[in-house]
Amino acid sequence: MSDSRNDHDNGPTMPGRRSVLKAGVVLAAAPLVGGVASRAEAAAKPPVANGPFTARAYGNTSATGPLGPLQIKRRAVGPNDVLLDVLYCGICHSDIHQARNEWSSLPTVYPCVPGHEIIGRVQAVGSAVTKFKVGDIGGVGCMVDSCGTCENCLADREQNCLMGATFTYNSSDRATGENTLGGYSEKMVVSERFVIRIPPGADLAATAPLLCAGITTFSPMQHWKLSSRQRVGVIGLGGLGHMAVKLAAARKAKVTVFTTSPGKVADARRLGAQEAVLWSDTAAMKRLANRFDLLISTVPQSYPMQPFMDLLALDGTLVNVGALNQLQGGLIGMSMAFGRKSLAGSVIGGIAETQEVIDYCAARGIKADVELIRPEQINQAYDRVVSKDARYRFVIDLTTGKKA
Ligand code: NAP
Ligand code: ZN
């Protein structure tokens, strides 16, 4: 993943990045429980119309520290910006990787406020905003900005921006130069271009995960043109994996899940898979050789991929969306050459495609299987995600005291 972080973008008059960060984020002195109790107090202070304002958030200050309440600074609502009163935010495994500084090519700047599956109610709009009005529901996924002028941005592929997309957290805000802070937060200020319209009547908590888990698995199905007669394998049944199963089943593709968790076999079928195979089932792996048109790997860690490459049919592709650090070697050239097989990567999707998956799911009643948690349960939820125990997405409920 590339990053637009570059202090030179800030221009000569901007203060240095570190001083901005120090000024922009104030750690809340209150412990977690006290912090929640004082939410009403924070909500009582409306955002300043023409300036930055403070908001309550949840994040951590070191790779090994737990997440807790923070007071953060949000930028002033600019002419093209939307102010969202956040209602729900999903917990993606990427949040955990970033909070714990697990991505070697994308080091974490602390304090870190994760969260990129965000649903909120529009509380204010800038003077030039046309897409939203106060009271609308908007969604924010993994990106909040991009250069807007490179060939990829012009082709609706902002996630592949040649200047580096601005991610929702741990990126350099193109407007202020400050470190972006994500959706585990009461308020967000986002350019309307990067806010997705959420159709009326949507189940808001169960729609939040579509903004990352949904688009990340939908996009490769679109790009590799997964069709109804094809066989697709989903490797890893977690947040992304369970959306991959639902989205592939909606296209009437034949879905097989590859899981390390015996307890998920029955779930895989309930979610729409025809079959679920344990990685350890060597007989099944042999039986399924040369059968799959597409494999989508959502596993967060690198692992030996050759046994899965062996499952691809002629011209098949294994799309890795999960493991983003160094991949394990061991792929056999002869096997890939004789089967004209491909190993590919893919990252989220563009804004137009994200709107498309939201509308596609709304039209078909597709939503994530979610477990709602309170903000003070974030650390516990992280432990359960890491131990493959999410069924299948935790979503933080930030509606307390708000009209959801
Ligand atoms: P998740 O909910 O933790 O699901 C991952 C699943 O992979 C687990 O439920 C488990 O499924 C399997 N798994 C986990 N650890 C494993 C291991 N050591 N060996 C084998 N299987 C393992 O995570 P997620 O939120 O779906 O995210 C998955 C990965 O995608 C993360 O690394 C995340 O950073 C990345 N991601 C990438 C993009 C992108 O744009 N490319 C977007 C979002 C997320 P079973 O129990 O079925 O084995
Ligand atoms: Zn994500």
Image: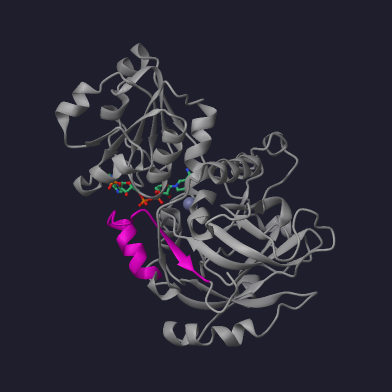
What kind of colouring is applied to the model shown? one colour
Identify the image quadrant of the C terminus: bottom right
Q: Nearer the viewer, residue 183 or 21?
A: 183
Q: Quadrant of residue 273?
A: top left
- Residue 291 visible, this angle: yes
- Where is residue 387 shown, x and y percent of the image? 27, 57
Say which residue appears at 65% left-offset and 42% top-offset: 158
| Badge count | 0
Visible in this render: residue 179?
no
Q: Residue drawn 58% across and 65% down? A: 181
Which quadrant of the view contains residue 136? Answer: bottom right
Residue 21 sits above or below residue 166 on the image: below
Foreground residue among 200 and 401:
200
Residue 203 lies left or right of residue 386; in this view the side is right
Residue 294 among those drawn in magenta = no
Q: Position of residue 147 (x, y in %)?
A: 71, 46
Residue 188: give x, y in percent of width and height. Answer: 64, 66
Give the residue furthest to the top.
Answer: 338
Q: Is residue 87 above or below residue 140?
A: below
Residue 392 in the magenta stretch? The answer is yes
Q: Write down the region rendered in magenta.
A: 378-398
